[in-house]
């Protein structure tokens, strides 16, 4: 009898009562000895800025992203800024970009004195709508920045055609999309320059800030290297006014340890996305929630698994999940065209309806590679608990599937 009681106690002790949005320590723990050794080696070398580890990381990124050149920098935000600087974007220029994205995309444009022109999204993928982008091109448009949001590439066929038609600089914001593909080509090889972030929450994250740019243009790569180091070449001789955006060697050393595991971590995210989709279908929640979809011609790497909660109940569900110990996040609660700092641009509420709807309805669930099936079961059980008739029955969401879905190429390929 005692062993049975002991087993019951053990089962109770391991019963899941919370699930974090992200647990970086689960990823770092098995690699801790390698990471410590790599950092110690850098400390012993005394080469802390753009050392050999940075060159190694640049070579790995260039190969992985199918781009001949990769240039390391201090952050994903700086990568965007450098890309626009290298393209001579400045005062009087306009840059097309989605409103439903992280602030850095627009912040880089604004810092250079150019004007962000906000574009609505395709609601099925949350990515920039090429048709709306085309309608906003003017004689002042200098560049376009498609954001590969949540790990899925934007419609690069339409966007590249638009850029070529108007002679626009095409900058990929691939901060959330390392390893994603469009038509068999990797993010970072689809435009003039690709911008990546190594922020700790990314699919390949460091232990601080870090960034990378990729390009197939050697002249552009040389320009990026010049600009990241104050425009200095050779030392103390300045060819241009650049900035200080050099990757710390310690970050590169850690990222080099983690790089060989990126594909297995991506597979883990893809498996978790597929499991969520199955569980949400089995509970019937897929009939009332808006589940994420993957475009058939894309490889989705699932930096986030984002669902739509219709009927104004997103915040109530989030509070319910919080009380149950489930970590969630809202990406993003206020679209950029309605941010206070861009008031002078003159966008009114309702001007980008799909971006505003996404901001009001979406919530991100835990998706990190080390997430267990039992934890996902717990998340979905708590969601189903909220949606039962005695609680808050969720109405079927309004979802205009937009241009991508109407093409017949959209599929829930998860």
Image: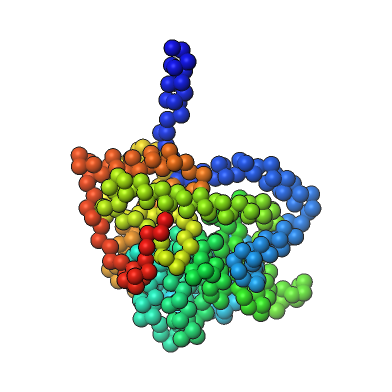
In the image as oriented, which residue stretches furthest toward the right? 45
Residue 27, by quadrant, is top right
Q: Residue at x 41, y 33 (%)?
A: 17
* Residue 223 left/right relative to 334: right
List x then y, in percent, for residue 280: 33, 48
Please state which of residues 28 and 242 is positioned toward the viewer in this rendering. Answer: 28
- Residue occupying the point 28% across, 66% down: 400
Instruction: Name which quarter of the figure residue 327 lies in.
Output: top left
x and y, in percent, of residue 167 in the image: 50, 85
Q: Is residue 222 visible?
A: yes
Q: From the top left corner, tell me how far across and down residue 352 is, in percent.
A: 32, 70
- Residue 413 figure quarter: bottom left
Q: Is 232 rendered above or below residue 165?
A: above
Q: Is residue 223 visible?
A: no
Residue at x 38% of width, y 39% of height: 378
Total labels: the figure holds 0
Nearest the viewer among 204 and 348 is 204
Q: Nearer the viewer, residue 111 or 325?
A: 325
39 relative to 15, above or below: below
* Residue 158 picture location, percent across and down: 43, 77
């Amino acid at each position: 009898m005692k062993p049975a009681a002991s087993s019951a106690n053990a089962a109770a002790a391991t019963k899941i009562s919370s699930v974090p949005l992200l647990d970086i320590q689960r990823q770092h723990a098995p690699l801790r000895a390698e990471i410590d050794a790599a950092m110690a080696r850098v400390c012993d070398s005394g080469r802390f800025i753009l050392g050999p580890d940075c060159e190694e990381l640049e070579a790995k990124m260039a190969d992985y992203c199918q781009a001949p050149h990769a240039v390391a920098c201090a952050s994903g935000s700086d990568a965007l800024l450098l890309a626009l600087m290298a393209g001579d974007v400045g005062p009087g220029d306009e840059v097309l970009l989605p409103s439903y994205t992280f602030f850095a995309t627009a912040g880089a444009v604004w810092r250079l004195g150019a004007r962000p022109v906000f574009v609505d999204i395709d609601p099925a993928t949350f990515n920039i709508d090429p048709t709306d982008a085309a309608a906003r091109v003017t004689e002042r448009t200098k560049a376009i920045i498609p954001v590969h949001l949540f790990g899925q590439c934007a419609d690069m066929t339409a966007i590249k055609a638009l850029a070529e038609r108007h002679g626009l600089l095409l900058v990929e914001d691939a901060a959330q999309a390392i390893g994603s593909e469009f038509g068999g080509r990797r993010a970072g090889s689809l435009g003039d320059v690709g911008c990546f972030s190594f922020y700790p929450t990314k699919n390949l994250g460091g232990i601080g800030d870090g960034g990378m740019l990729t390009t197939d243009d050697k002249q552009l790569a040389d320009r990026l290297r010049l600009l990241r180091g104050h425009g200095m070449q050779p030392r103390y001789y300045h060819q241009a006014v650049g900035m200080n955006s050099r990757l710390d060697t310690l970050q590169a050393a850690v990222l080099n340890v983690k790089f060989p595991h990126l594909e297995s971590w991506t597979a883990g995210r893809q498996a978790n996305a597929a499991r969520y989709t199955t569980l949400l279908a089995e509970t019937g929640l897929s009939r009332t929630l808006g589940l994420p979809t993957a475009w058939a011609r894309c490889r989705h790497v699932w930096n986030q698994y984002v669902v739509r909660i219709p009927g104004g109940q997103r915040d109530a569900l989030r509070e319910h999940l919080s009380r149950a110990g489930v970590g969630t996040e809202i990406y993003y609660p206020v679209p950029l065209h309605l941010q206070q700092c861009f008031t002078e641009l003159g966008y009114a509420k309702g001007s980008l309806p799909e971006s505003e709807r996404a901001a009001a309805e979406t919530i991100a669930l835990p998706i990190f590679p080390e997430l267990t099936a039992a934890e996902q079961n717990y998340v979905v059980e708590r969601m189903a608990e909220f949606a039962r008739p005695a609680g808050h029955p969720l109405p079927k969401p309004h979802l205009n599937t937009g241009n991508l879905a109407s093409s017949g190429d959209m599929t829930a390929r998860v």
